[in-house]
Image (spheres, rainbow, N blue to C red):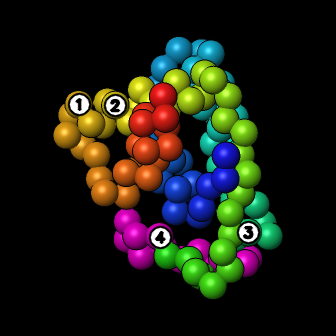
């Protein structure tokens, strides 16, 4: 799947920080895949202002990331949990459509 900078940041922010050992290992690998390398940092020029992350929008940086079945299950479960607890944000909608609606 191809992910934008915004989608990668949002996914990184919602991935669970707790779980069983196998889930945590999958989440750790997924975090590494979603993270930004040195070249991307330089190109995007990230800045942090409180809780807001800003970046250079000029380069349309997208990254192809293969998401396995179990990682998909974790993402779907997380998004459904946010929905159940009425914690979904408008920024989550593209991910909801990609993972939950496609499920």
Q: Disc 1 to disc 3, how far (Cα)? A: 35 Å
Q: Which of the labelled discs sits on residue 80, or is there none?
A: 2
Residue bearing mark 4: 53
Taking the image as shown, residue 54 lies to the left or right of residue 83, namely right
Q: Which of the labelled discs sits on residue 40, or is there none?
A: 3
Instruction: Give the magenta part as a residue range.
Output: 42-53
Q: Disc 4 to disc 2, how far (Cα)? A: 25 Å
Q: Are marks 4 and 1 in contact (CB under 8 Å)?
A: no
Q: Decide which of tag 4 and tag 1 comes sooner along the chain.
A: 4
Query: Badge 1 local density, few (<14 within 10 Å), some, or many (20+)?
Result: few
Taking the image as shown, residue 85 lies to the left or right of residue 47, namely left
Closer to us: 59 or 44: 59
Residue 76 included in the magenta stretch of the image = no
Front: mark 1 or 3: 1
| Residue at the outermost left position | 86
Query: Badge 4 local density, few (<14 within 10 Å), some, or many (20+)?
Result: few
């Amino acid at each position: 799947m191809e992910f934008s900078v915004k989608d990668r940041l949002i996914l990184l922010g919602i991935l669970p920080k707790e779980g069983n050992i196998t889930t945590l290992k999958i989440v750790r690998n997924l975090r590494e895949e979603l993270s930004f390398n040195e070249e991307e940092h330089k190109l995007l020029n990230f800045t942090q202002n409180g809780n807001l992350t800003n970046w250079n929008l000029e380069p349309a940086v997208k990254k192809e990331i293969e998401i396995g079945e179990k990682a998909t299950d974790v993402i779907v479960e997380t998004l459904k949990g946010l929905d159940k607890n009425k914690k979904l944000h408008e920024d989550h909608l593209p991910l909801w459509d990609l993972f939950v609606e496609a499920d």
